[in-house]
Amino acid sequence: MSEEIKKDQYSADSIQALEGMEHVRMRPSMYIGDVSTRGLHHLVYEVVDNSIDEAMAGHCDRIDVIINEDNSLSVKDNGRGIPVGLHKKEGVSALEVVMTKIGAGGKFDKDSYKVSGGLHGVGVSVVNALSNHLTATVYREGKIWQQEYERGKALYPVKVVGESDETGTMVTFKADDSIFQTEIDYSYDTLAARMRELSFLNQGITITLTDKRNKDDEGNFIHEEYYSKEGLKEFVEYLDATREQLIKDVISMEGEKNGIPVEVAMTYNTSFTENLHSYVNNINTHEGGTHLSGFRRGLTHTLKKYAENSGMLSKLKFDISGDDFREGLTAIISVKVAEPQFEGQTKTKLGNKEVSSAVSQSVSEMLTNYLEENPDDAKIIVQKVILAAQARHAASKAREMVQRKTVMSGGGLPGKLADCAWSDPEKCELFLVEGDSAGGTAKQGRDRNFQAILPLRGKILNVEKAMQHKVFENEEIKSMYTALGVSIGTEEDPRALNLSKLRYHKIVIMTDADVDGSHIATLILTFFFRYMKELVENGNIYIAAPPLYLIKKGAKKKYAWSDAERDEILNEFGQGASIQRYKGLGEMNAEQLWSTTMNPEFRMMRQVSIDNGTEADRVFSMLMGDDVPPRRDFIEKHAVYANIDI
Ligand code: 0RA
């Protein structure tokens, strides 16, 4: 009879497990955020996070990530191996429980120091549910164990497939293309940025990334290895590699307050921007939270006290604000919280109250010691703060001008703006167009109901290298603020962005498809990234993609956006077809510009998104900074227009 009961029990449980799996497949976004490329990459992070947990528990120091030729993905670690013995409650192998029970991952091993685990901390079973096929291989107890699954369902009980002295876990999965909106095609750069980030955040682990879809010039698979001996200190050095440093070494500290591990690394550079990146359990908390406010408080408090005691502030005629302490600051704050509460729109804002004082106390102690032991650096930092305060004073005047000129304060729209007729921001688009002549064509070609045109003259200011008040004094930038209806500065936060009067929800950067055009687009993007980041985060910024070729034969004509597309069309048209190559927007007439680049029914636009905020920061400072070699390397690697102009 007991056998009977067990069987019933087993089937009851497996039905429940199945329901969990069905739910994941029915509502994937609830588990992985969305089913776009972002969600797809999230699957990889979820699997890697399990191995990171094993590493953080001290049992693993190597993780290999492999993009296979067929876009299946493998993650292999040298940890203890997921246990394969009978799970008493479930009556099947523990491995099967981990792989098929939604939510089992976390509860499975209560004692382990588990703080990683994905944005949603959902576990590898979710990846299994969203995969056409998954193979789990465990090296453990002298044997190699294996189980395979289809859409989360085990195909057979765990079996022994060989012998081995090694220990570890390997998971290979093929994401289900019926779940995702996009093709199952991993971005090497996206995965590389995350693996590099993870290696900085978890020092001492070797993480490798291999792309078996592509080979380098020597015939080897694309492969990189990430290893950081000194963790956050090296992360800050990496981020600031192209910025000029004010102090000799990165200041770094590691401590624990009230059971909360806190790690901070920071430095000051000669730029005018603040680059603060915060992490909770290896997750980038874009929206900040209590750990970030704790850091700010500790920093301001300690530096202010030091500056006052040193007497360096005696000649200053106005107060120093919190912002002044963070100009030119690059810092990473990483905390590990056992039960994080994530809030905010994208669930990337830490809510745990107790973390704030833990971080603030840690930072105060560390900095106080540092300033006392390094008086030369301390002096340099305080001088930088004083300069920032003076510049802020100048900037606030320029900023008031921008404010006064914005639409809602009655300053009127910029003269160059050809506005649209409709006023519902959700329906309206603003095209930022390079040059007056292309601007003219765009004005003729547009649908004037919902498309507005703002021509920008030549190269706009490089905000990466300009002081804030210069930015607010710049004519092109002022006209962007006014046209967009965006204002800045409130009583309590002079940098706060007011987007409530945003006049267009789509902002389209339209430049020539050549090197100059992409440079201008990058300058405009840099401006949005540094001064209106929320618009980028909210997905309001787009880049227009004008066609590169027009192919004609008799009455037939077709446009091509790439060389491959051009060749396809040439093939289709056969002998006697002619090709026109568009070098700039100016070569198109109004009708052509409308039908290829502006008409929502046919145009191709790229929505700008930030998949890795920390990496985006580094790329902008590198692209727009003074150092030429890294910029050249980056452009050579990513050049889309290289075949046209060089
Ligand atoms: C719980 C217990 C043990 C290992 C693991 C979890 C484990 C999970 C994953 C996921 C990916 N790689 C992993 N490696 C290990 C082992 C407990 C023991 O051996 O005593």
Image (cartoon, rainbow, N blue to C red):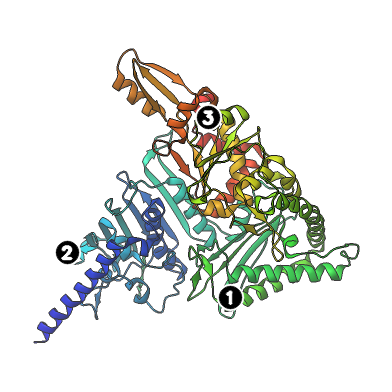
Locate the N terminus and report the quarter of the image it occupies.
bottom left
The mark nearer the N terminus, 1 or 3, is 1
Classify the position of ligand 1 by quadrant: top left, top right, bottom left or bottom right.
bottom left
Task: Tell me the crowding category of disc 3: few under 14, some 14 to 19, or many 20 or more residues within 10 angstroms, Cα based.
Answer: some
Q: Secondary structure at mark 3?
A: helix
From this view, report whether residue 533 is shown above or below residue 18. Answer: above
- Identify which amino acid the numbered label 3 is placed on: Gln
Q: Residue at x 62, y 57 (%)?
A: 498
- Identify which amino acid the numbered label 2 is placed on: Tyr
Q: Residue at x 51, y 34 (%)?
A: 639
On the image, the x and y values in percent for residue 642 come to 51, 29
Are the two marked residues, 2 and 3, in contact with CB atoms closer than 8 angstroms? Answer: no
From the Cβ of disc 1, is ligand 1 less than 8 Å away?
Answer: no
| Residue 66 shows in this picture | yes
The mark nearer the N terminus, 2 or 3, is 2
In this rendering, the count of numbered labels is 3
Which one is nearer the viewer's eye here, 518 or 125?
Answer: 518
Depth check, mark 1 against mark 2: the one in front is 1
Depth check, mark 1 against mark 3: the one in front is 3
Residue indicated by mark 3: 444
Depth check, mark 2 against mark 3: the one in front is 3
Q: CA distance from mark 2 to mark 3?
A: 66 Å
Q: CA distance from mark 1 to mark 3?
A: 56 Å
Locate the C terminus and report the quarter of the image it occupies.
top right
Residue indicated by mark 1: 355
From this view, report whether residue 567 is shown above or below residue 398. Answer: above
Residue 39 is marked as none
- Identify which amino acid the numbered label 1 is placed on: Val
Residue indicated by mark 2: 156
